[in-house]
Image (cartoon, rainbow, N blue to C red):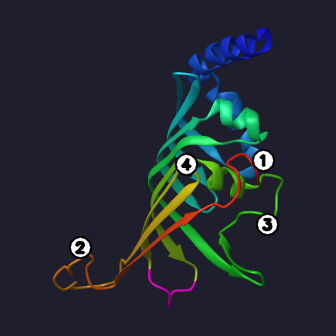
Amino acid sequence: MLAVALVQSVGRLGVTVLDELEFGINQWLSVERVRLTGLSGSWRYLNPVVSIERVDLPAGTLAKVTVELDWLESLARNRLVARRLQIGAGTLHLEQSAGGWRLRGMQAGGEFDASGLLYHSDQVQLAATLAFADEQVPQLQVAYVATNRGCYHRHRLQINNVAADQPGPASADGCLNGCGRFELGARDRLWPLWE
């Protein structure tokens, strides 16, 4: 119990000075050609919240990024789990490689596996434009929302074709010409803390 209180206290102190650590964090991330702007932190109940105004990547930019780490679930699962992960806007450039599509300029592989973070997080929201290296493929606006409540996963994906010159009238589901929507709901059969 003392260790938990100590980690919470150090975490709360560290999050409050996060904006002052931005320069050092950017130096550390410069190897990967990543730059953060407007880094700040706060605390919500037991969870640290990190906000970033802008993330510059070799593949583009992300804006209005907010991550609320679910501290207790991360501890129980021994991996990062977000209570809330939001990316408000962005543009990402994709290129085709021998293994399929990937983010432009990003190295394949790496040690960080985002699949667990995305699978276990309570809420994930992403709004971005995808631009492709192949000029034949139009830019796509993507809006993705995933929720996880009581082992019930729900995903909503909306894709709009940016190149649609004169979109027609909206359909019954609110989608204009050149867009599509996909929704999926699924319930896990496993106990909530099992993989």
Which of these two is toward me, 177 or 63?
177
Closer to the eye: label 3 or 1 = 3
Which label sits in the foreground, 3 or 4? 4
Query: Quadrant of the image for the N terminus?
Result: top right
Q: Which residue is mark 1?
A: 31
First reached walking from the N terminus: tag 4 or tag 1: 1
Q: Which mark is residue 108?
A: 3
State the CA–CA distance, disc 3 to disc 1.
Answer: 15 Å
Element at badge 4? loop
Q: Residue at x 79, y 39 (%)?
A: 78
**Counting residues from the N terminus, which is met first, the one under dot 4 or under dot 2?**
4
How far apart marks 3 and 4 lie (CA) works out to: 34 Å
For the residue marked with disc 1, what is the amino acid?
Val
The secondary element bearing badge 3 is classed as loop
Circle count: 4
Instruction: Give the foreground label among 3 and 2.
Output: 2
